Image: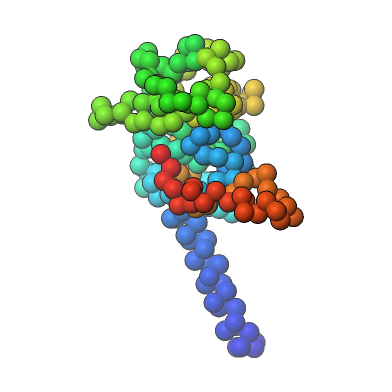
Amino acid sequence: MDKSWISQVKPIAFSLALVLVVRTVVAEPYRVPSPSMVPTLLVGDELIGSKFAYGFSKYSLPLGVVPGVSGRLFDKPPERGDVIVFRLPRDPATTYVKRLIGLPGDRIQMKEGRLYINDVQVPRRPAGTFEGSNLYLETLPTADGKGREHEMIEISDTDRYDDTPVYLVPDKHYFMMGDNRDNSLDSRISPAEGGVGYVPEENLVARADRLLLSSNPDVGWFDIKAWPNAFRLDRFFGKVS
């Protein structure tokens, strides 16, 4: 065998292996395709998910599912309010990103557009408007009692999923919602209706920590005059909160 050929292949193989290890163990990029997490995440945002934040499961490999593996390795529970990249329970080949609202054992309900966790209304205060929708600062309850504030938008308090039954989050499952409350397929909607339902802990892939870059999806490659507006520079390397 030609040794020179081997010497050329080795660095390529090493580089590919390094990329695979990084994407499996450390972080994985994710491009936001829908407006369900507006205003926190915009269509065209590219973010980095911290994979070691929650440990690793059969969905940790970027190349696909590891067969015959269950549970999590180095498991660490997520915190309420985390923005999480996860595999869709009804279609594990699809990746979603939502905010964690309900922990195992929680009672979650929407009444007249207001979020209730364990029968207590979650505080929110008006913060203006965002692209025609009402902008609010919502404060989710936390174990330390300090609360965790984040932005969310709502068109109205009378939308289809603004009044729901009580959802009791099963053991080892989580309840996810989009920050764009009236435009999000999330845990309020059952898998049979095309929604998310409860998310098993093994489906968690990563915690969304930081944006890499952000581009305007309306600007095409051949729309040269619009190129100066193609990137949202103010969002580059921004923290996801």
Q: Position of residue 85 (x, y in %)?
A: 50, 41
Residue at 40% in and 32% down: 150
In the shown orientation, is residue 191 left or right of residue 237?
right
Please tell me in which quadrant of the rendered image residue 146 appears: top left
Please tell me in which quadrant of the rendered image residue 151 appears: top left
Q: Is residue 180 above or below residue 2?
A: above
Q: Residue furthest right?
A: 222
In the shown orientation, is residue 117 left or right of residue 15?
left
Quadrant containing the N terminus in the rendered view: bottom right
Q: Position of residue 90 (x, y in %)?
A: 61, 32
Task: Return the residue nearer the eye: 156 or 89.
Answer: 156
Residue at 36% in and 26% down: 139
Please tell me in which quadrant of the rendered image residue 8 appears: bottom right
Q: Position of residue 112 (x, y in %)?
A: 49, 11
Colouring scheme applied when the structure was drawn: rainbow
Quadrant containing the C terminus in the rendered view: top left
Count of picture labels: 0
Q: Is residue 200 visible?
A: no
Residue at 73% in and 52% down: 223
Q: Position of residue 148 (x, y in %)?
A: 34, 31
In the shown orientation, is residue 144 left or right of residue 222?
left
Q: Is residue 1 visible?
A: yes
Task: Return the residue nearer the eye: 80 or 56.
Answer: 80
Residue at 53% in and 70% down: 15
